[in-house]
Amino acid sequence: MERFKKLFGAQDMTVGRPLVNLATFAVPLLIGNLAQTLYNTVDTIVVGKYVGKSALAAVGTAGPILNLLLLLFMGISTGAGILVAQYFGAQRREDLSSAVGTCLTLTAIASLSIMIVGPLITRPLMSLLGTPEDVYDMAVAYLNIICIGIIGGGYYNIVSGVLRGMGDSISPLIFLIVASVLNIILDIVFVANFGMTADGVALATVIAQGISGVLCLWRLTHMGGALRLTRASLKPDREMTKEIVRLGLPSGLTQAIFSLAAIVVQSLTNSFGTSVIACSVVVMRVDGFAMMPNFTFGMAMTTFVGQNVGARRMDRVHEGVREGIRVGIIISVALVAAILLFGRNLMELFTREDEKDVVELGVHMLRILALGYIAMAVTQSLSGVMRGAGDTMTPMWVSIITTVIIRVPIAYGIAFFTRSEALPHGTPDCLYISLLISWIMGALITVALYRRGKWKEKAIVR
């Protein structure tokens, strides 16, 4: 019984072997990321099989705009996770409760803002992107439903980040699995049985995320001695809000810039037609699985480093970095091998038998990207270290440089110089060659900045 309680309680990562801490924390997180990616993938499979590539393209076109709207949650979540991890590691319970309460209130404000603004800007943005006519209405309907029901997903993302900052990665995992199963069932009911298209997928997602958000809030209010939430702690603390904004703003800006760059690239993607848009959606779903270990170890590193910086254990930080990167690279190599061997089978899961053009193009694109996943293992792990220490600016600048300064110009440059009668808009390869180059450059820049060591001076708790 004690082991069961410990598994679902807050995890102190300032004691024990770092690799064991990281594995204990990361494995549930990895399973959770798998579940989340799986139900996003099921969304894609259902619309691809039952509706066709136009619905696939609608979901893909809406993606960058949705990410732009979610940047408020990204900022709050990052700031909350860092504060919670460091206050927890430093055993400062009152500050911990104030930080969590402030985050809950900020999440409500962010949710209401998106619910109001989102539906007002979806149509103008879709028109600006030059969305094909057979995709336009489905994409708008998808986005509107997601925006109106954003509060559930917002609270899941924020509160699960708070729970992980306290070392509890099991509860968010269980709630996410519940949401994933529900989402899959509702996808099939709404699309296959009721004849809905992308709007059915969006409705299923909103309902499932709402359930997971409620469950996370319930868990947070039953944390026992690790946290004490009261009405007073829910009142936004001015200094705490400033600290969350200071820490979260770089990640929010990074997401905003990344999303704007993705919108620019999406406009280029749209110029290649519905088949290329649909292919990009499927490739990004496969990409989600390949990137999963990288993002997981990055998040685990943030919590591990945050707690140990709070406890002033830099010796453990360096040991954890070495072991975490080693494991991350090994897993990424294995996944790259799997993508190269089974890429065609993966692409065929998402498409109809009469849409072989999407499959062939997707296999080609996956081969271009494959080696980049190993580079991203290094980038995500070291970025997680910097964020955990309180340095959120450095990863922000790396993301801006790689996404805006490197990827976008290279993508448009390749497209421009490969134009011909057969390819009036250039080669679609430009979308993924540019991404591969940006990933490799990002890894090189991140390693250099990590070794420089300025991130060690950013600790919040002193």
Image (cartoon, rainbow, N blue to C red):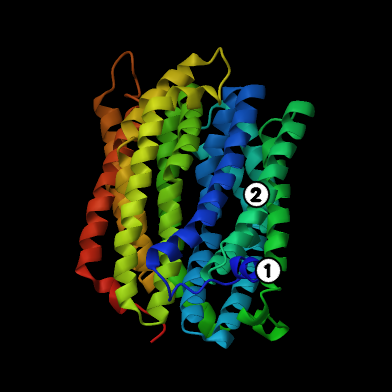
Q: Is residue 115 visible?
A: no
Question: Is the residue 371 above or below the residue 91 in the image?
Answer: above
Residue placed most toward the observer, 450 or 399: 450
Q: Position of residue 433 (x, y in %)?
A: 30, 34
Q: Describe the element under mark 2 as helix, strand or loop.
A: helix
Q: Position of residue 10 (x, y in %)?
A: 57, 72
Disc number for residue 177: 2
Question: Is the residue 162 above or below the residue 262 in the image?
Answer: below
Q: Is residue 135 visible?
A: yes
Q: Residue at x 56, y 12 (%)?
A: 354
Estimate the spatial distance between the alpha carbons at disc 1 and disc 2, rounded to whole Å. 23 Å
Task: Report which quarter residue 214 is drawn in.
Answer: bottom right
Q: What amino acid is at disc 1?
A: Met
Q: What amino acid is at disc 2?
A: Ile
Q: Position of residue 222 (x, y in %)?
A: 71, 73
Q: Residue at x 53, y 46 (%)?
A: 65
Q: Describe the element under mark 1 as helix, strand or loop.
A: loop
